[in-house]
Structure formats: C-alpha cells, structure tokens
Amino acid sequence: MINELLQYNFIINSFLAAVFASISCGIIGTYIVTRRMVFLSGGITHASFGGIGIGYFFGFNPVFSAAAFAVLSALGVEFLSKRTDVREDSVIGILWSFGMAVGIIFIFITPGYVPNLMTYLFGSILTVSELDVWLMLGLVLVLIFFFTFFYRLILFVAYDQNFARTHKITVDLFNYVLISLVALTIVLNIKVVGIILVISLLTIPQSTANLFSKNFRNIILLSIVIGLVGVFTGLLFSYKINIPSGAAIIFSLVIFFVLAKVFQAIGRRSILRTKTKKTFV
Amino acid sequence: MSKIVELKSVFAGYNNEIILNDVSFEIFDDDFIGIIGPNGGGKTTLLNVILGLIKPVKGSIEFFGDSDANKNNKIGYLPQINQIDKKFPISVCDVVLSGLIYSSGIFYKHPKEDRIKVRETLERLGICELCDKPIGELSGGQMQKVLLARAIVSSPRLLILDEPNTFVDNKFEGELYEILVQLNKEMAIIIVSHDIGTISAYVKTIACVNRGLHYHKSNKISEQQLASYNCPIKLITHGEVPHTVLKTHNHSF
Ligand SMILES: Nc1ncnc2c1ncn2[C@@H]1O[C@H](COP(=O)(O)OP(=O)(O)OP(=O)(O)O)[C@@H](O)[C@H]1O
Ligand SMILES: [Mg+2]
C-alpha cells in the first residue's frame, strides 16, 4: 500500500518535472538562442558542476550550491563581457573547465560512495525529488511573470542594447537579472537531462520552432509545445526499451527537428511548384 | 536657431586609449552636419559620446532646451548596420515601436497612438507594406529605412545617423538624402558618411573627425583643407570638388 503510494508519487514528480522543464527551457532557451548565448550557457552549465561537488563534500543538497555557483559565474561573465579588452569566449572556456575541475576534486575527496553522481551528469528524471519539483514550479512562475510583463523590454534590449541605452533603459541591471534566470533555469533542469545534455533542451526546440516562426513570442510558445512532445516521447522510449531518459529525450527532440526540416523542405517545394504552374497557365 | 547640445573640450575613448582629443562641438536645432573621417578616426566614438553611450574621460557635455530632460526622445539614433543582428526574430513594426519605448506605460505596454505613429512613420518612408515582415527578410536598403523609421518615430530634436548609406544602391541613397532634407525642417541631423562628394551636396556643414574634430562651418571643402585637418579623405569619388555638385542642388540654407 505505502509502496504503491510512493511509486505513485515519484511518477507524479517526474511528470511535473517534465512539464516544468519544457516550459522553463522553452522560455529561457528562446532568449539564449536569439541572443546567441549558447556557448555561455554551456559554460554556466558545466561550471555548476563545481557547486555540485561542493554540495556533496559539505553534505547539503547539491542543487543549492550548484545554483549559487552557476549564478555567480554567470554574473561574472556578464560583468567581464562589458570590458572590451576581455575575450568573452576565452573567459567562458576557463570557467567551463574550472567548474568541472572543482567538482571533480570535491567529489574525489568526499569520503565514501557518492550517490547519484550519474544523475547530475546524465540526468534521471525518475530521481527528481519533491523539493526539486517545488523549485521548478517557482522558477516557472517567475519566468512566466517576468516574460509576460517585461516582454517588450526583453525584446528591445535583446535586439539592440545600445539603442535601449540611448533611451535610458538600465540595460546592465536588466542583463544581470536575465543571466541569473538563465543560470537558475540551467541548474534546476540538470536533474532532468543532466549537465552534459541540458543545453539541448535549451536549443533544439527553439531551432525547430524557428523553422516555422520568426516571432519571439511564438518561438517561445512553440518551443514549449515541442519540448513537451519531445520530453514525453523520450520518456516513453526510455521506458519501453530501457535506455537512459536524458539521452532518449534529446534523441526524440532531434528526430522532431529533422522531421520538421524535411516537412518544411517539402512544403517549400510544393509552394514553388504551384507558383511555377500558375506562371505557366 | 537654438542650441541643442554642447561638448566642451571632451576627451573620450575606450579602456585606456583616448580616441577623441579635446573636442568642442555645438549643435543647433537647424543643423545638418556631415561627419567625415578615415576608418577608425573616431566618428562612431563621437556619436557614442553625444548619445551618452560613452562617458567622457574629461570635459563636459550639456543638453539644452526641453525642460523635461528625462523624456528620452530627444535624440533619434540610427546605428551602423553591422551592429544589428539580422537573424533576430522581430518584426518591422516591433522594431519601429521600440523607438517609442519611453512613452510605454506600466510593464511597457504601448498606447494605441503609438501604433498609429508607427504606421505613419512607415508610410512616410514608403515602407508600409513591410510592417509585419520579420527583419530577416529585408534587403539592406529596406533595413536602413526601418532603422531610420525607428530613429524618427519619436520626433526627436536631433537625428544621428551612422553611415546609413552602406550596403545600399544609388537610388536608395538619393531617396534617403531627399528624406533627410525634409526631416531637417523638423530636426537637427548629424550624418556620418565616407562619401563626402554626395553628402556635401545635401548637408549644410562638414566636420572631420580624426582623433580630434575639425568643424568646418560650410559644406564646401577642398583637398588642401582636408590635408591641413589631417583628414585623409579622397574627394575624387564624384570627380570634382563638391562645389560642382552643389550647383545642381539649391536648398535654401
Ligand atoms: N568598443 C571598442 N573598444 C575598444 N576600442 C574601440 C571600440 N570601438 C572602437 N574602438 C577603437 O576606437 C577607434 C575609433 O573607432 P570608431 O568606431 O569611432 O571609428 P570610426 O571613425 O567610426 O570608423 P569607421 O569609419 O570604420 O566606422 C578605433 O581605433 C577603434 O579601434
Ligand atoms: Mg563608425
């Protein structure tokens, strides 16, 4: 009886995590892709591994230390990128490997067996805890609020920062807030697909959506839908043929991208054909 | 004729490198100033100082008129096109609307009048049909017009254009200058261009920026003067010295 209930609970948790992951990654991923911050996001993701290691060593929930690590490194890169004498991509590269190194060292010196390490590297949606789900829900609510009410501002600042500055918009503050949201989104989604794969949840649905829409808002909405479909297809695969859920999710997202690409190419060709037919008639 | 902006012995640059040395510059509300100078001379830097994007290391910059100094719509700005991301998913209307962001209300919602203003501005530039297009589908000239629309939609007192004639054909260039001459009746204009032959036919005065500023309060300029300004710009682009071009245009200066 209790066993059944437990089982029920963890299924609910993973279901909710999948939904929240699709929403948060749909929103933040669109921002990342359009601002061309994919590499930076990769850096933040891997840097957060340092926080995970520290969490293990000191014996508290790695999610919190990972979040702190990710947000601080994101703010650091954002701060340095304003200086023109710094190569932003090199800084990201350093941060990327430094975070991983810190993580490896702390996990190595942590006495005894390190549970769930693989969970963080490759993701395992079934191990998502109730706390994780609450945190993800909080994040989703903040993102929906922020992107609804500041939509215009996000669009304008993302499109042309200097122009926004000439209109006395506090671009720097705004960028700091957004990069922090990016970092939090990354960290809270690590459990779902893992450090190695989280970037794909932030870019593949967007790239697919971008094939069909050139409107920021629609790309967000479409990415969320594509994310949902991809995540649940992946989970189904993972269950049916017993493969890791993170990899299965990415695999199905890529399949959808390829299908969309093919679909689009066929659509284009048939439009061309009808057009040429008309000109001949 | 009233003063809009005054720079007093401004020194400005990036990191520790000073690009602009001791620049003093006054801009009046009926000015139409062409800025020329070699690549890397500091033209864009000067515009950035006026726009407030770069703080001078030394010297002062002051704005006049308009008691409501915070209304933010005093300067319209058209950036050099290489600073714009053409793949960004945004429509023409939304780009132009961003020129009115100072007037948007709480949570940056725009009143209806703003959308009407956007329409009117697009109409004025003859690109009404582009409104709902994503910017990724525009030609270079169309893109310039959209950026111009964004710059003027707020009816600024000063319009600043950084090389609006790159990547556009001669037809568009002529069109653009005719539009600017019209706009100049309502606002002061500063335009950066490498094509001194063409701009001198339209602008009222010419300034040369090469690590410093030489403000020549006339639109006639000779090779010798340019040389003395240390401003190595070739005048041969349109054959003769611009005086000849001038004769064919008669604006009432
Ligand atoms: N963001 C920056 N950081 C550091 N140095 C810069 C920056 N922008 C410009 N510079 C330097 O300042 C100098 C002046 O550049 P600026 O862009 O003002 O020239 P410009 O006259 O506009 O040239 P162009 O005709 O090529 O547009 C150049 O030597 C350039 O290397
Ligand atoms: Mg320039």
Image: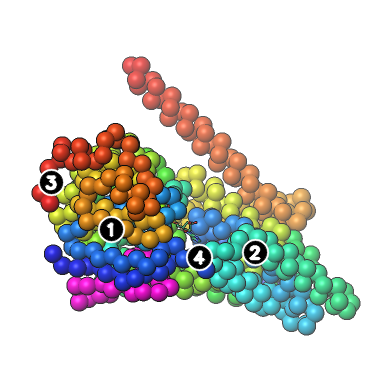
Displayed quadrant of residue B74: bottom left
Q: Which residues are magenta?
A: B48-70
Mark 2 highlights which residue?
A: A91
| Mark found first going from the N terminus, 3 or 4 | 4
Residue A154 lies, in percent from the top left, at 43, 64
Q: Please say if the residues under marks 2 and 1 sit with CB atoms less than 8 Å apart.
A: no
Question: In this view, which residue lies farthest toward the left?
Answer: B252
Q: Determine which residue is flagged by label 4.
A: B17
- The disc at residue B215 is 1
The verdict on label 4 being within 8 Å of ligand 1 is yes
Foreground disc of the pair 1, 3: 1
Please say whether residue A122 is visible from this viewpoint. Answer: yes
State the SS at label 4: strand
Q: Which chain does tag 1 point to?
A: B
Q: Nearer the viewer, mark 2 or mark 3?
A: 3
Q: Nearer the viewer, residue A131 or A262?
A: A262
